[in-house]
Image (tube, rainbow, N blue to C red):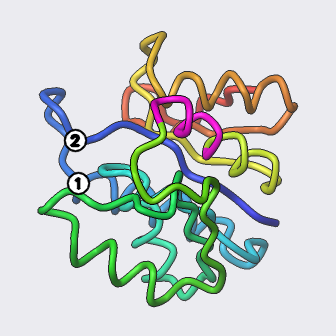
Amino acid sequence: MIVFGTGHRPSSDGYSYVDMFYRAQDALEVTTEHISAAVCGMAAGFDLAFGQAAMALDIPVWTVRPWVGHKPRRDDVETYRELLEYAERRIDVNDAYTYPGPWVYQKRNEWMVDNSDAGFAWWNGKIGGGTYNCLEYAKEKNKPVTNIYPENEGMRYV
């Protein structure tokens, strides 16, 4: 089974990157014998924590950057580089070297959903934004997503 991760950045809700990492690791560990690859969208926050958790469990990772020239935030440079080096597959959804526009993030989300069997989300339940859009697309495609955000843990999105 191929799984993807989608979620928010650490924010004022009191959860940190470390919280995201351990929640992702716990969720992946429960199903690790069934996971053949973890798809990481390479965005700051949960995406990178999810990829790093998969790497810690020796699960193959596919990195999916929205465009060729996509770069990490300064704080994420090392994690981003480690994931690219570890990756079994590296996918660039768009061949642009400069930012092509906000739509490219949804195209990346669609690639992840279309090429996975299921997903894990760090979703606070708020409507709107990239995580919500990814979940809505997964719902359209009938791909199950388990929310591991603490207040909504275990909630299935599809």
Along the polypeptide, which appears first: circle 2 or circle 1? 2
Q: How many badges with numbers are in the image?
A: 2
Q: Give the range drawn in magenta.
A: 101-108
Which residue does the image show at 61% across and 46% down from the upper left? 108
Q: Residues within 10 Å of mark 1 (few under 14, many from 20)?
A: some
In this view, 36 is above or below 8: below
Alpha carbon distance from label 2 to label 1: 6 Å
Amino acid on which the number 1 mark rests in the picture: Tyr
In this view, 102 is above or below 76: above
Please tell me whether mark 1 sits on a helix, a strand or a loop. helix
Quarter placement of the C terminus = top right
For mark 1, what is the residue? 17
Which residue does the image show at 68% across and 66% down from the upper left? 31
Amino acid on which the number 2 mark rests in the picture: Pro
Please tell me whether mark 2 sits on a helix, a strand or a loop. loop
**In the image as oriented, which residue stretches furthest toward the right?**
142
For mark 2, what is the residue? 10
In this view, 101 is above or below 45: above
Which residue does the image show at 77% across and 38% down from the upper left? 144
Q: Does the magenta stretch include residue 14?
A: no
